[in-house]
Structures are given as structure tokens and as C-alpha cells.
Amino acid sequence: MLFADIIGQEAVIRKLRDSVLAGRIPHAQLFLGMEGSGALPIALAYAQYVGCKNRSETDSCGVCPSCVKHQKFSHPDVRFSYPVIKKGKEEALATDFIREWMATLSENPYLSYLDWLAKMDAENKQGNIPVSECRAIMSALSLKPFESEYKILLLWLPEFLGNEGNVLLKIIEEPPQKTLFLLVAEQMDQILPTILSRTQLVRVPPIEGEDLRRALEQRFSLDAARAETLAYVSDGSYRRALELLGEVDEPLLQPFRNWLLMCFSGNKVAQNLWVAEAAGSGREEIKALLGYGLHILRMCLVFPELGEKARLGEAEQEFVSKLSRQFNPTSIEKAYKLFNDSMYQIERNGQAKLVLADLSNEMHKVFVQK
Ligand SMILES: [Zn+2]
């Protein structure tokens, strides 16, 4: 990726570029930004810039042999690592999913964790970075670079490194010569503190509204007003904007709708079954579902005023339009608070089963009391 392909984020890019031009390349950096902000594309563009044989002061050349390989995500001196699902009962390595990974990056480097799970056909499986992967990383990094100055590890979502991740500490602390660690994360509080303390932090903020608007206008030939609304409701996430445009699937709409219908009906048997199943999925999945709920509730708030202008994806719009009629200003505030509190509890490791059962009961009350 070129820096020119990144949406906004000029300040972050300028800093990164300046450090390369000045020959001050930190050996371990953590790119931290929320989903859709572009932390991963920025790390990819940075890796390409470091390796470019003919870089300018602003960007990689895009045509030298190193750039060509980077652009195909197939540079032999770049080892990618990311959460993967098990193959059958066996732990898998990132390299087992490298085809899917390369295809995903070419399609949309602003991907979310759930997009990635879907790409691996994960169904109910959760992603993980197992200790076998950490060992594979170490052995890959012990080799000398094949053709570039640096060997690069680009590790996406170190949040998924369990305590096993500590086996990487030594190599991060005393890396083989000319090795760069680029970690790309979304949630700082989920990263092993030992890893955090050994990396230089590169904060990637949400994309500025104006930058996002311009990108949407240009990339999708939208009129200015529509681009502006989309940028506004996307909260600085290009991934979110793509979803609203129907460019990527909204995997959470169906499960969320089913859940709310169940709360609405107050069917206890169905609810218990659902809670047991949902609580068994990973914490990240639960957080994603709650986060999606918060987004839908926000949309229910603004929908009566914005109507068509909210420009949601078609299926989502239909759902929001129906759902918003089930609320009044008090009940929607109550629902929003319930979701927010549940998110807070899940983030602090509250028991998923209890939290989800409570939330379902309370949502039922909101619907009957409205
Ligand atoms: Zn180049």
C-alpha cells in the first residue's frame, strides 16, 4: 500500500515518514487505532516505505521490485501473523491461512476482526494466536532477510496473544539485527503489559470527518450531501462506512434482530437457549454484538429526524425504521443505557451469561412498558 491510499491520517503518516527519512526506525512499534481507522493499512504502507528502493520524501515509488511484492502482500521478508481458527482440533498457524489473508488485504485492508473470521469460515470458532504460532514467528525471524535491509513481523491484533505471547518477549527485547516488529491493535487494555512496555506507541485516531467525506465522495462517486451524512454516522471508521454503503456484509444484523425479537416476545425458553449459546461465544464476539446494538439504538434515535438521509444499508434501514417505532424518547434512552452498562460489565470480565440474561430481561421490560 502507498501512503496515498490511506484515508486521512496525515499527521500520523508524516511522523512515520520523517522517522524513516531521518534513519530513525524504531525496532518495535504498536499501531493502535479503533476498527476502521486505518491502523493496519498504515502499518502496511509503512512497511512498504521502509523497503522501497526508490522512495520519495512523500511516498513509496510503487514500482520497484520491493514495492511490487509489498503491494501483493507477498514480500518474502514480511512475516504476517494474525488470529486464526483451529483446523479441526489442531491449532493452526497464520501461514495456514495466508491465501485468505492476502485475498482479504487486497479486497479491504480496513477489515474488522469479524470480517476476518467470516473469511476463514469460522462459524462458531474463535480466533487465537497460539504458542505454536509464536514459535513459528521466532524461527522465521531468525533467518536473515532474503532481499531487503529489514525482516519485518507484522502482527495484527496482539490482543489475541494469551500469556503464551510472553515467549515473544525475548525476541522483541533483543531482536536479531535488522528486524522490525509492527504490531497493529485496537484495544490497548487487552494487550499483554509486558509487550506493551516494549513497543513504541503509534496512536491512530478515528478518521477526520472531512477526510472520510472526501474519500467516500471520490471512491464511490457519491454526491456531497450523502458523503457527508455517511461520514458523520460512521464515526471515523471507514469499515463502518463501507458497511453502510452495502460494500461489506453486516454479519451482526440478523443475530441482533433475532435477539431483540426474542426479548420482545418474552419467550423464556428461547431466551435461555440463546443466552447459553451467546455466552459460549468469545468475549470479542459478545462485545461486537453489544457494540452493534449500541449503533442500532443510536440510529433509532436519529432515524425519525434523518429518515432516508441516515443512508443506512437497505436491510439495516428497514430494521431501524421498524424498531424505532417501538421506542419513545424515554424508552430508547433506557435501552441505550442498558446496552452501555452491559458492555461495561463484559469489558471488565463480568460473567457473560448473567450479563446477557439480565440485559434480555430488562429489554423485555423496556418493550412492554413503552
Ligand atoms: Zn518502491
Image (tube, rainbow, N blue to C red):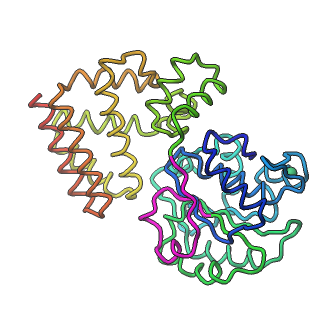
Which residue shows up at 68% across the image and 69% down it? 26
Q: Looking at this view, is 232 or 118 the one in front? A: 232
Specify the quadrant of the image occupied by residue 137.
bottom right
- Give the x, y percent position of residue 159: 49, 64
Counting every numbered tag in the picture gives 0
Quarter of the image containing the C terminus?
Answer: top left
- Give the x, y percent position of residue 226: 51, 19
Decide if residue 308 is on the left or right side of residue 30. left
Above or below — where is 47 with respect to 2? Answer: below
Residue 121: in magenta span: no
Q: Looking at this view, is 96 or 184 the one in front? A: 184
Above or below — where is 134 with respect to 30? Answer: below
Above or below — where is 185 with respect to 230? Answer: below
Which residue shows up at 66% across the image and 27% down it? 219
Specify the quadrant of the image occupied by residue 181.
bottom right
Decide if residue 7 is on the left or right side of residue 346. right
Which residue shows up at 55% across the image and 52% down it? 204
- Give the x, y percent position of residue 1: 74, 47
- Give the x, y percent position of residue 139: 72, 78
Magenta residues span 183-205
**Which residue is outermost to the left?**
369
Which residue shows up at 51% across the image and 60% down it? 127
Residue 202: in magenta span: yes
Specify the quadrant of the image occupied by residue 203.
bottom right
